[in-house]
Image (tube, rainbow, N blue to C red):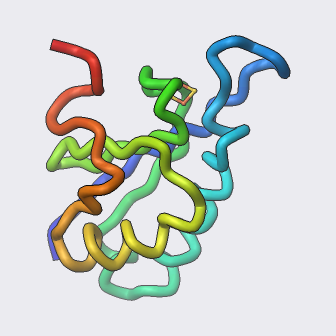
């Protein structure tokens, strides 16, 4: 199974901040669910690293996460999307197209 490294935004801004926070949109739950799934799967456990991180940039598309080495950016991710990301992308090698907001670079960057 291909090695992958996921970065999941768990940024938390003060309440009412105009840019919002991925944590308010499920970022921490997404991170926890990913960790649960990966730790329960021996193949994924040996091939996948998940790192919670600060702001990745596209806050308006939160919750966001990015998968390397492909550089697939996911936006508007909900905790309920974790299963699809694990099965389709991490196990099957096929990104979940309905959640992809950019490839190779953060959305909105040239
Ligand atoms: S707060 Fe998550 S991308 Fe900025």
Q: Where is residue 21, by image quadrant? A: top right
How many labels sit on residues?
Answer: 0
Q: Is residue 94 left or right of residue 21?
A: left
* Residue 89 versus residue 65 in the image, above or below: below
Residue 17 location in percent, x, y? 75, 14
Query: In which quadrant will I find the C terminus?
Result: top left
* Residue 87 versus residue 15 in the image, above or below: below
Residue 10 location in percent, x, y? 61, 39
What residue is shown at x 27% (from left), y 74% (from top)? 88
What residue is shown at x 32% (from left), y 75% (from top)? 46
| Viewer-closest of 70 and 99 | 99
What residue is shown at x 72% (from left), y 38% (from top)? 24
* Residue 65 versus residue 45 in the image, above or below: above
Residue lying furthest front? 98
Ligand 1 image position (quadrant): top right
Q: Is residue 32 left or right of residue 4?
A: right
| Viewer-closest of 105 and 100 | 100
Q: Is residue 38 left or right of residue 13?
A: left
What residue is shown at x 28% (from left), y 70% (from top)? 90
Query: In which quadrant will I find the N terminus?
Result: bottom left
| Viewer-closest of 11 and 48 | 11
Residue 84 location in percent, x, y? 39, 72
Residue 107 location in percent, x, y? 28, 26
* Residue 110 versus residue 71 in the image, above or below: above
Q: Is residue 16 left or right of residue 26?
A: right
| Viewer-closest of 75 and 37 | 75
């Amino acid at each position: 199974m291909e090695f992958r490294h996921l970065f999941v935004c768990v940024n938390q801004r003060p309440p009412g901040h105009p840019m919002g926070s991925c944590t308010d949109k499920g970022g921490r739950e997404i991170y926890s669910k990913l960790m649960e799934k990966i730790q329960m799967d021996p193949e994924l456990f040996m091939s996948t690293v998940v790192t919670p991180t600060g702001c990745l940039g596209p806050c308006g598309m939160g919750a966001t996460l990015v998968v390397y080495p492909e550089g697939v950016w996911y936006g508007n991710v909900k905790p309920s999307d974790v299963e699809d990301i694990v099965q389709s992308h991490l196990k099957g090698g096929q990104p979940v197209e309905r959640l992809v907001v950019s490839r190779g670079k953060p959305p909105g960057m040239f």
